[in-house]
Amino acid sequence: MIFIGFILAFLISEAFIILVRFLLRKKEIKLWLNVSIGILEIICSIAIAFITMVGPVFPIPVVLFQFAIYAALMTDGIGNIVFSIINRIKKQNNKLILKTIISLCLGIIFLTFGIINMEVVKPKYISLSSNTIDREYKVAFVSDMHISSSQPVSVSINTIRKIKAENPDFILLGGDIIDEYTKKEDMEKVLSEFKDTGAKVYFIYGNHDPEMNITIAEYEDCLRNYGITIVNDEYVKLDESIALLGRKDYSDKTRKEIDELINPYNDCYLIVVDHQPFYFIDNCKTGLDLQLSGHTHAGQIAPIRLIYSLTIYSYGTYHYGDAMLNVSSGASGWVAPFRTEIGCQYEIITITPSN
């Protein structure tokens, strides 16, 4: 239903733009004004994208229209600029038809790319070394699956199967595995894939997980039924020389201050999983070696990642002293089946002894 709703919202947005263009067909618009209109449309689309991703959460039909209007304005703005260049080189008589064709073609290409980009989930391989560990470890990290929100359930299931095929020692679920639009039966179908994986699986809450349509007790029972260990502001020893600190999400008012969490495994390689990446330096007080986070979706829709990167950890790796932060783009997205930023990912991290 979300997919159909998004497509309909996009078609309505495109129809409105075509109608406005038709009503203004007899107006003589100069080249510089046409370019200016295109630039203004692009700026408006970016503003809508920003409000959609970081502004207040509206009902889902409104959010789908926000995504759709962003796509329609972005492609029409680029189309206006492309038309202006073509018209400058060779004067066109059928301006209305040509503008419409360019806009629609760009819209279809943009829409197709964004939908496919949301459904293709790829591994990102990271190799690290440390003199703290005594053998090689392979750690899988996946966050922001948003089960049945932006992807078909089959895509989420396939993602988990690909992770299992990597034969990791541990699988870390970095939050937002479900959200307010996830159906209980879809959640159970996907999470059941973690049963009998051969790897230990650990779950850390994100900001969307508590907003689901089922109770926390039902959610946690489901996780435990499939062998998934829930880690809430606590340290867990994964193996002889490697440990995990799973942080409650920052949106959780019961989240402890980092100074309250005393590390009992000082001699171990320490991985901190904190859904939101913004508290990396604060978490470094634990003496962590590696922090794994998600939450940002690498912006999800362009150019939000660029805007994020001006003030926050948006995507990729960052360093503070000897500690490293990796921010995942996430294995899915939020609400709309549409992604025009860096594609969906999960991380496969190999840590080897440095000596």
Image (tube, rainbow, N blue to C red):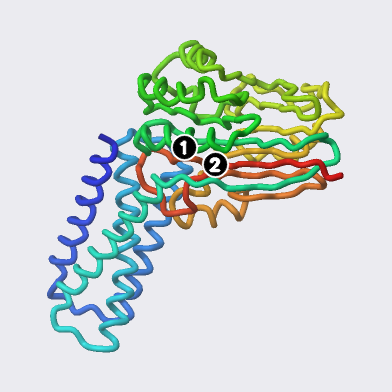
- Left of 65 or right of it: where is 302? right
Helix, strand or loop at label 1? It is: helix
Residue occupying image coordinates x 69% and y 42% = 350
Q: Position of residue 346 (x, y in %)?
A: 54, 41
Instruction: Name the kind of residue labelled 2 in the image.
Output: Tyr
Q: Residue at x 66, y 41 (%)?
A: 349
What is the three-letter code of the residue carrying label 1? Thr
Q: Quadrant of the N terminus?
A: top left
Asked if 157 appears above or below 217 in the picture, the reply is below
Tell me which residue sits at (48%, 33%) in the image: 160
Q: Which residue is mark 1?
A: 159
Residue ranking furthest to the bottom: 90
**Which residue has dot 2 on it?**
346
Give the secondary structure at mark 2: strand
Quadrant placement of the C terminus: top right
Neighbours of disc 1 within 10 Å: few (<14), some (14-19), many (20+): many
Percent x, y of residue 2: 29, 37
- Residue displayed at 66% across by 50% down: 317
* Total residue callouts: 2
Residue nearest the viewer, comparing 65 with 198: 198
Indicate left or right for 135 with 313 as reference: right
From the top left corner, tell me how far across and down residue 16 is, in percent. 19, 56
Q: Earlier in the sequence, mark 1 or mark 2?
A: 1
Q: Are marks 1 and 2 in contact (CB under 8 Å)?
A: yes
